[in-house]
Image: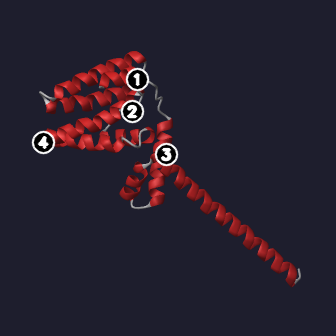
Amino acid sequence: MDQHAMIVVIAAVVVIALIALAGWFYSRQRRSQQLRQRFGPEYDRVVREEGDTRKAEGVLEFRARRRQSFKIRPLERTQQAAFADRWTAVQSRFVDDPKGAVTDADQLINEVMAARGYPTSEFDQRSADLSVDHPRVVENYRTAHTIALRHERGDASTEDLRKAMVHYRSLFEELLEQTPVAKERLG
């Protein structure tokens, strides 16, 4: 092979390597963009928690694969109505018994999750599972749960408990996949 042919072969190999490298970078960038879109603020939270973007993206992809194994189903209208009525009762109870209302709200969220088909194991796993379908409100769930834990220790004020109820409500509404009739019941 003459020197000119060797230069052409080397140039072709370099061009192919550069194209492959550009394709790899593009696919990584696209993966990150898709995960950012899907998980919203949860993406940033997991990146901060993991301290490494690649590791965090692996965690989020694992969550999405795990979620695919669940048989998530919408609630029937009668279930929606029953849960909405129970939520109204929990909210009404807040005035006279804020601590009991927060405890009941936490329990009701777990029941709605179970009725929808989400596993209801320990809290960290529940919130991770929810983050796949409800990334914009899962942080509300974490905040409300933290307040509920503080309440169990006697460290939560009535204002804290009110905030917990507001946070629980945002997740409850999403989990309920409310129809206009159910939204009216929630007031």
Q: Callout 2: few (<14), some (14-19), or many (20+) C-alpha neighbours within 10 Å? A: few
Q: Which residue is mark 3?
A: 38
Q: What amino acid type is highlighted by mark number 3?
A: Arg
Q: Position of residue 154 (x, y in %)?
A: 10, 41
Q: Reading the chain from its start, which is encountered first: label 4 or label 2?
A: 4
Q: Are marks 2 and 1 in contact (CB under 8 Å)?
A: no
Q: Which residue is mark 2?
A: 174
Q: Which residue is mark 4?
A: 157
Task: Describe the element under mark 2 as helix, strand or loop.
Answer: helix
Q: Position of residue 84 (x, y in %)?
A: 32, 22
Q: Residue at x 47, y 40 (%)?
A: 66
Q: What amino acid type is highlighted by mark number 1?
A: Pro
Residue 138, quarter of the rendered image: top left
Q: Which residue is mark 1?
A: 180
Q: Viewer-proximal residue, 152 or 162?
A: 162
Q: Viewer-proximal residue, 117 or 131?
A: 131
Q: What amino acid type is highlighted by mark number 4?
A: Ser
1 or 3: mark nearer the eye: 1
Is residue 86 left or right of 18 when viewed as pictured?
left
Is residue 86 left or right of 153 when viewed as pictured?
right
2 or 1: mark nearer the eye: 1
Q: Reading the chain from its start, which is encountered first: label 1 or label 3?
A: 3
* Label placed on residue 168: none
Q: Callout 3: few (<14), some (14-19), or many (20+) C-alpha neighbours within 10 Å? A: some
